[in-house]
Amino acid sequence: MNKNIYELLGLVVALSFILALKGLSAPKTARRGNLIGAAGATLATVVVFFAPLGKDSMGMAKTHHNTLLILVAVAVGVLVGVPAARKIQMTQMPQLVALFNGVGGGAAALVATAEYLNLGADASTAEVVATVFTVIVGCTSFSGSVVTFLKLQELMTTRPVVFPGGRFVIAATLAGVLGTGGWTIASGGNTPLLIMGGLALLFGVLFVLPVGGADVPIVISLLNAFTGLTVAASGYVLQSTLLIVAGTLVGASGTILTRKMAEAMGRSLFGTLFGAFTAKPQEATGAAETRSVKSGSPDDVAILLNYAQRVVVVPGFGLAVAQAQHTVRELADLLSAKGIDVAYGIHPVAGRMPGHMNVLLAEANVPYEQLVEMDEVNPTFPQTDVVLVVGANDVVNPAAKTTPGCPIYGMPILDVSEAGNVIFLKRSMRPGFAGIENELLYDAKTTLLFGDAKDSLTKVVNALKAL
């Protein structure tokens, strides 16, 4: 392929990635942005096979090596990735993002290592530095992402894992990583590079273990930014403009997303990562076993909704688990037909990832104008007759404002406690993802409707139609 054509196609790919990020910034254009990004990634993969490689010492055009092996690897990736993407539930999307992100970081580290070994003594100092950076950050991203996957999939505890002297072990491991990195740059040997990679893998695990509860998705976003920087650095080693552009875009967008998620949780990034070492243990009061709550029937809820003038639906992770988005839209449409003002109050990290709930409700064709962000809906709660909380817990828990030291303290929440009535749809009294009790459940204005969210909403819809 002509070099100019190759560079032009690279520019098209870079532009498609930029347009994809722009599209993903709003629910209405997210699907289109995703398709543009996928098309750009496909084009980037294809044009690599036709990249001009120059000529050898005999004046002959260089050709790609191991093309068959590359095609086999691509085929394996397609066979694994396509079924995973098609069958994954929306509730498991954060885990999938974590896993794919980790694979990307690990792949970049492996590619940079292979290129470094291939260059041998011919590697320049800049290329060695870029390789060291890629391996450190890529290995950290890989092992850290695996731990976040295990936490979100509940294959291990979702709570922070701390141990005596943990912060010093983490600091010592990081010092070891940086020390072996300097050793690699100074000596150019292979052994220190391998030791450095092993220590980076260990650091990734130690880095994520102290993070738990609702903070895990923030770390996923941070590791995603790490992976982007890794890809950009490996692009320098491979002299690939495409990888540099793509990695820089991922790194920049991941950094912005991490900052926004930390703000949505009401804490600093440092507090998110290392707050478990300074948090004070909370004493169990046993209150959940001694206090009673007010429960109701679908008919009770239907009557309360029927005589309301304004209703706000607060969707959460439980709605996604029950796949109740279509039923909640049916209920909202029924209320709107009765002249009742209906809105959806969306917390920035509802469903564990930004935009997660917007996508879920978009599947049910919920009008975008009914989706109201937290800052806009909070002032309206005092004028709201009924708030219907469907599977949410931590994002409406007053402990975020009233209980210093609890895992979610300082997190901005939806102020549903200011509404006239609150209806909670819950399977049980089990705490939310953060693992703490919600005092709002025991408030006199709160009614609990126990059961599967989809089944409960169906019964409420039928009862409402009968009124």
Image (tube, helix red, strand yellow):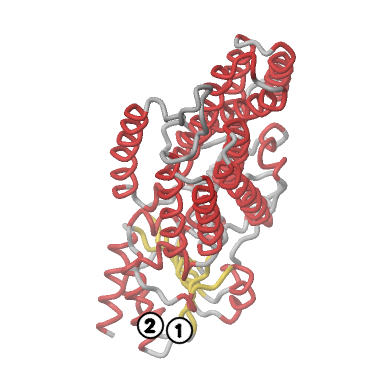
- For image coordinates 68% across by 57% down, the residue present is 401
Q: For the residue marked with disc 2, what is the amino acid?
A: Leu
Quarter residue 186 falls in: top right
Task: Please give left or right for residue 161 compared with residue 328 in the image.
Answer: right
Name the outermost residue toward the bottom: 339
Q: Nearer the viewer, residue 301 or 219?
A: 219
Give how far across and how far down residue 117 sits, in percent.
Answer: 56, 17
Residue 26, given in percent of the width and then of the height, sits at 52, 67
Q: In terms of depth relative to the viewer, which is nearer, 365 or 48?
A: 48
Q: CA distance from mark 2 to mark 1?
A: 9 Å
Residue pictured at 68% horizontal, 20% vertical: 177
Establish if 401 lies above or below 240. Answer: below
Q: Nearer the viewer, residue 336 or 286?
A: 336
Whether the residues at callouts 2 and 1 have beta carbons within 8 Å, the answer is: yes
Q: Does residue 67 lie above or below 450 as drawn?
A: above
Labels 2, 1: front one: 2
Give 419 or 41, whichever is nearer the viewer: 41
- Rendered view: 56 above or below 451: above
Q: Residue at x 46, y 71 (%)?
A: 28
Is residue 276 shown left or right of residue 311? right
Disc marking residue 335: 2
* Quarter that holds the N terminus: top left
The residue labelled by disc 1 is 308
Callout 1 amino acid? Ala
Q: Residue at x 60, y 26 (%)?
A: 135
Residue 371 on image: x %, y %: 50, 73
Q: Image quarter for residue 284?
A: top right
Image quarter (top left, top right, bottom left or bottom right) of the C terminus: bottom left
Q: Secondary structure at mark 1?
A: loop
Whole-percent x and y of residue 402?
Answer: 68, 55
